Amino acid sequence: MARDIQLKERWEGLVEKLSQRFSDGDPLELDAIIYLVGVQELGQYHKKYKKDDKLDLMHIAICRLLEPYGYYKFEFFDEEGWPHYSVKEALPPLKAGEQTVLMKEAIVEYFLEKEFIE
């Protein structure tokens, strides 16, 4: 149970910190944070993205976030600088709540690794 409490506290702190920086304090939702991770991983910050690009950025983020769990493997950057991943292992069937917890855990670990949070 202590692990769940720590995850909850870290998640809430991360949402608050990101929300202050990127949305004038309005709480960011999970999808918005995944999108921010995608932009971070692509490294092209001052670009306007089309709807399809935004979905691709979220895909990049999910691959990067789940890479440490053994689900994806980074392969290469294409000529435009977009990272490409391959599937190493299919995700197990998860209920919506379980998916959310997995993504929150992966996002918290990502921002711990980047030393954005403690």
Image: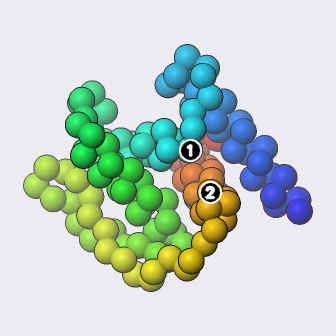
- Furthest residue in direction front, as rendered: 95
Viewer-side residue, 99 vs 4:
99
Quadrant that contains the N terminus = bottom right
Residue that appears at 58% across and 27% down: 19
Q: Is residue 46 above or below residue 11?
A: above
Count neighbours of disc 1 (C-alpha within 10 A) and say few if under 14, some if 14 to 19, many if 20 or more: some
In this picture, residue 25 sits left or right of residue 70: right
Residue 52 screen position, x and y as percent: 24, 46
Q: For mark 2, what is the residue?
A: 100
Give the colour scheme of this rendering: rainbow
Residue that appears at 45% across and 82% down: 89
Residue 93 screen position, x and y as percent: 56, 77
Question: Would residue 116 be seen by someone viewing this image from the given angle?
Answer: yes
Question: Would residue 17 be seen by someone viewing this image from the given angle?
Answer: no
Residue that appears at 15% across and 59% down: 78
Amino acid at dot 2: Thr
Residue 110 screen position, x and y as percent: 55, 53
User: In the picture, residue 96 is in which quadrant?
Assistant: bottom right
* SS for callout 2: helix
Viewer-side residue, 98 vs 19:
98
